[in-house]
Amino acid sequence: MESLIGSFMGGGREAECKEVHDPLSGSLRGLCTSWKEPLVIPGPIIVGGGPSGLAVAACLRAKGIPSVVLERAHCIASLWQLKTYDRLRLHLPKKHCELPLTPFPSCFPTYPTKLQFVAYLEAYAREHGVRPRFNEAVVAAEYDEALGFWRVRTATQGALVEKREYLCRWLVAATGENAEAVAPELEGAADFGGPIVHTSSYKSGDAFRGKRVLVVGCGNSGMEVCLDLCNNAAKPTIVVRDSVHVLPREMLGLSTFGLAMGLLKWLPLRVVDALLLLLARLVLGNTAKFGLRRPQLGPLRHKALAGKTPVLDAGALALIKSQRIKVRPSGVKRLMKHGAEFADGAAEEFDAVILATGYRSNLPRWLKVYAAKEVFGEKGDLGGGWKLGNKGLYAVGFTNRGLSGVSLDANRIAGDIEQGWKSQLEKIKVTSFACSHAPPSRRISNFTK
Ligand SMILES: Cc1cc2nc3c(=O)[nH]c(=O)nc-3n(C[C@H](O)[C@H](O)[C@H](O)COP(=O)(O)OP(=O)(O)OC[C@H]3O[C@@H](n4cnc5c(N)ncnc54)[C@H](O)[C@@H]3O)c2cc1C
């Protein structure tokens, strides 16, 4: 530990230190230690280099606070760059998806394509000087009470050997609600003769031309994949086991999301839900007639209470109505060599299966004991919180509000960290003077708390 603190005082390897992008480099440079020892980070560590992580780093930098972003992939926004299909566009209008400090270019369409969104994020990272440390997957983060620091351990993604340990006072979890693909184990999957792929590896329907494809799951991804399959001359069947809210993407000339947010400023949730359902019925008709039963709760309450996002129709519903997309109203019982048997006893032949079964967060796997005991709610979620406990732990992008919630979280987090950062700078000024006049044995305790 002494060497760690020694390096906090200004020792350590220059090569390692340069990787910490540090606007305050004049005063704090050299806070890190040698390769095998923990690397002390003067500012916060942000885990995840997606939109949320970039937003927090940018807000912090605007306040003069250096941060380190650890990203498991080799690029920023890995979900968007590596795990989404080609035809993807933002589901919500761009004004609800922009990150703090930098709006989307005015020449972008209302619903930017995935490539445009990625280009925006790349430019955003450049503009705000955010340079994540890539290929660093955080495998464990726990609070060291004795030291008063978070210990953050990383490994190369998929590797067994740990790479490095960092120490920091503030830790921001920005690993997203979609960090891991959820793929149910279907009985008989091993016998199935065709490919079974999760939407995270699906790129385009081109690979399924002329094929009978079973799409399991009817959220936004499942519906859009069906649309894409149709556009590529494949024959999709979608499994709709549960009830689902399908809403038009736009109503009364406004985006449905924007309309709902606007109405919520004046009316209670129940009333807004009732209005949305009335308008959806007028625009789309009775979706139950086509196998898409609506949940008992309205779309906003269903989202708030069950976490289920309504499907914003991008064209799939018309294909369901014309039966180019077939709907199967019951779950898959098992897969067979050339097809599937369903829970209602029906069976059908298929050449491929696409699992549009969603994602989950990986927070419980790497955020250790302290967080698990004190922070996670009964359901293992974060209860919509952005500040977790009082040990310098934050979460961004976990409020189930997509990109529209990211800006708000990022600004709040940066503002909160700024308070602690200023008082730490004061302490460093005072203590470094005292330390330079104290015998070496007293230096450790001066800097650990
Ligand atoms: C197909 C699809 C379409 C979507 N469309 C929209 C939309 O139109 N509008 C909207 O608001 N939302 C949309 N979403 C939701 C979307 O995921 C989020 O809004 C947005 O990506 C959230 O950003 P994030 O940074 O919180 O998470 P992510 O984008 O998931 O980024 C998290 C980052 O953390 C990294 N990471 C994960 N674990 C670790 C670890 N242990 N160590 C280091 N790094 C790690 C990941 O590699 C990733 O780069 C969509 C989601 C999907 C799947």
Image (cartoon, rainbow, N blue to C red):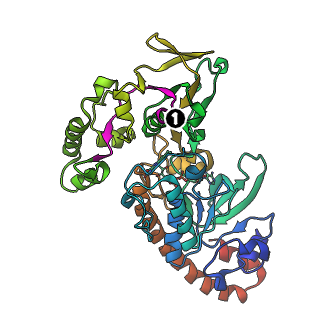
Q: Residue at x 62, y 17 (%)?
A: 188
Task: Name the residue carrying label 1.
Answer: 232
List x then y, in percent, for residue 24: 61, 81
Which residue is farthest top? 345
Say what secondary structure mark 1 lies in: loop
Q: Is residue 276 left or right of residue 324?
A: left
* Residue 288 screen position, x and y as percent: 29, 26
Residue 243: quarter of image: top left
Residue 391 image offset from top left, x and y in percent: 53, 62
- State whether residue 227 is above or below residue 414: above
Residue 201 seen anywhere in this rendered image of the structure? yes
Q: Is residue 244 magenta?
A: yes
Q: Is residue 7 above or below residue 329?
A: below
Disc 1 C-beta below 8 A from ligand 1? no
Check residue 440 for magenta coloring.
no
Which residue shows up at 65% across the image and 63% down it?
Answer: 146
> At 18% from the left edge and 44% from the top edge, which residue is drawn?
271
**As displayed, is residue 345 above or below residue 419?**
above
Query: Can residue 395 be seen by looking at this rendering?
Result: no
Q: Position of residue 185 (x, y in %)?
A: 59, 25
Taking 178 as reference, is 282 left or right?
Answer: left
Quadrant containing the N terminus in the rendered view: bottom right
Local crowd size for mark 1, using a 10 Å CA cut-off: few (<14), some (14–19), many (≥20)? some
Q: Which residues are magenta?
A: 229-250
Comparing 9 with 329, the one in front is: 329
Give the residue type that dot 1 points to: Asn
> Which of 284 and 403 lies nearest the eye of the viewer?
284
Image quarter where the C terminus lies is bottom right
Which of 103 and 400 lies nearest the eye of the viewer?
103
User: In the image, 244: left or right of 429?
Assistant: left
